Image: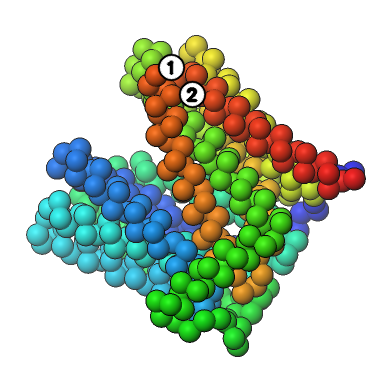
């Protein structure tokens, strides 16, 4: 009886409108990221690497502070401020590109701005589903959000390539601006109904460098003291180290070692994306397992089997099929873990816990990528993939043990 599926219920129209707006904005973001990367690559590999780094560094460094700000002023207010700031940034980017061109320093500066705004926008947006749907609907709401995000990446990347090739960076930025205007209009109209629309009367330390830092520390303290939250965040970190490098880092290395042509390089990524999308759509339609630890563990075991299959793949199609299993398993893990973190966070700490979840995954990935890359360089990509499979399988086994202990 512990594996029964929760009864689906219609999601609120308010949430669906907000989700449609944010997923449209995600399509624009993916298109702009592709256009920025392509434009930066025109100035050489070093510039392209710097532009990519300029987005990720401030996003990671300020993420926990962004969560503290969102909890201080409210997720909706912070999301509105972030969307408004991004609208302004991309409009200025379009104007500068149209009038002065895209010099390396221009691209670098706008990348820094985008990464900085993301650090405040992402935790706020991640907290809003908890405020827009009933608690029992959170798993399906997050699954639908994940499916929409994956679809946005699949649509946005080729759209960005098409726009930047046909009309340039400025046109792509204007298209992204239109999506931000749309999500601003939607967010202005919504009113959270599942929680307080404004911060509590005593939201915490006063705003300022010391107050923000104290808010960050308080978020970490809440996560550490909560056994379920602490375990979920640790599991998320281990899963990120074992799953995320599989297709993004080790997939291309495997393709080169196998001697397949360049056209095969995209097949694992495509397979992973399809697997993630299908699994998230199934969870959004049917609901998730009533025991999150069981669902998360089964998802990680499926991803581990897919990773091992990728290591043994002898053809590009076999690699794509194995990567699809990795994507489906990782999506199954995410749709069960996400509601645990979001649902287990106190109402006063929603954005900080979302920021912390993203931070621990990013930190784990930053440590894992060089390690798996070095292992692949020394012993081959299949050996590194098997190492990922072992780590992911161990994390899945640990989750199943927790599920079994909880049942007794």
Name the residue rendered at 39%, 59% in the picture. Answer: 61
Nearer the observer, 305 or 233? 233
Quadrant containing the C terminus in the rendered view: top right
Q: Which quarter of the picture shows residue 299?
A: top right
Nearer the observer, 268 or 59? 59
Q: Is residue 347 above or below residue 333?
A: below
Q: Residues within 10 Å of mark 1 (few under 14, many from 20)?
A: few
Q: Is residue 207 left or right of residue 285?
A: left
Q: Is residue 213 above or below residue 104?
A: below
Name the residue rendered at 22%, 66% in the picture. Answer: 92
Asked if marks 2 and 1 touch (Cβ < 8 Å), the reply is yes
| The label number, if any, that marks residue 379 in the structure image | 1
Q: Is residue 96 left or right of residue 230?
A: left
Percent coordinates x, y for residue 73 in the rendering: 50, 79
Check disc 1 and report its element: helix, strand or loop. helix
Percent coordinates x, y for residue 76 in the rendering: 52, 74
Check disc 2 and report its element: helix, strand or loop. helix
Q: Is residue 8 left or right of residue 171?
A: right
The answer to whether residue 395 is seen in the rendering is yes
Counting residues from the N terminus, which is met first, the one under dot 2 or under dot 1?
A: 1
Quadrant containing the N terminus in the rendered view: top right
Name the residue rendered at 14%, 59% in the picture. Answer: 98
Q: Which quarter of the picture shows residue 18?
A: bottom right
Q: Residues within 10 Å of mark 2 (few under 14, many from 20)?
A: many
């Amino acid at each position: 009886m512990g594996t029964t599926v929760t009864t689906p219920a219609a999601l609120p129209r308010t949430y669906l409108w907000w989700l449609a707006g944010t997923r449209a904005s995600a399509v624009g973001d993916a298109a702009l990221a592709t256009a920025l990367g392509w434009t930066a690559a025109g100035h050489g590999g070093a510039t392209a690497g710097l532009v990519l780094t300029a987005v990720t560094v401030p996003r990671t460094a300020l993420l926990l502070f962004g969560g503290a700000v969102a909890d201080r002023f409210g997720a909706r207010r912070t999301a509105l401020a972030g969307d408004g700031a991004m609208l302004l940034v991309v409009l200025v980017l379009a104007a500068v590109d149209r009038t002065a061109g895209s010099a390396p320093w221009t691209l670098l500066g706008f990348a820094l701005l985008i990464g900085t705004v993301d650090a405040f926008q992402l935790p706020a947006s991640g907290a809003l589903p908890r405020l827009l749907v009933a608690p029992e609907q959170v798993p399906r709401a997050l699954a639908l959000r994940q499916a929409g995000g994956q679809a946005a990446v699949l649509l946005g990347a080729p759209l960005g390539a098409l726009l930047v090739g046909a009309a340039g960076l400025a046109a792509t930025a204007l298209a992204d601006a239109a999506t931000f205007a749309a999500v601003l209009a939607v967010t202005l109209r919504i009113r959270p109904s599942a929680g307080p629309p404004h911060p509590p009367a005593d939201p915490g330390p006063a705003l300022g460098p010391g107050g923000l830092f104290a808010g960050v520390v308080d978020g970490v303290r809440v996560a550490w003291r909560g056994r379920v939250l602490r375990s979920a965040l640790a599991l998320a970190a281990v899963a990120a180290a074992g799953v995320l490098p599989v297709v993004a880092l080790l997939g291309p290395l495997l393709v080169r070692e196998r001697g397949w042509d360049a056209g095969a390089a995209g097949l694992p990524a495509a397979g992973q994306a399809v697997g993630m999308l299908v699994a998230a759509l199934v969870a959004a339609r049917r609901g998730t397992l009533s025991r999150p630890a069981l669902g998360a563990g089964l998802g990680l075991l499926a991803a581990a089997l897919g990773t091992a299959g990728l290591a043994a793949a002898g053809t590009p199609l076999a690699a794509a099929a194995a990567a699809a299993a990795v994507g489906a398993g990782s999506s199954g893990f995410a749709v069960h873990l996400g509601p645990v973190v979001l649902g287990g966070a106190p109402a006063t700490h929603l954005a900080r816990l979302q920021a912390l979840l993203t931070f621990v995954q990013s930190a784990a990935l930053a440590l894992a990528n060089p390690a798996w890359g070095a292992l692949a360089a020394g012993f081959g990509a299949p050996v590194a993939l098997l190492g990922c499979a072992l780590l992911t399988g161990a994390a899945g086994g640990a989750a199943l043990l927790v599920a079994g202990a909880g049942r007794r």
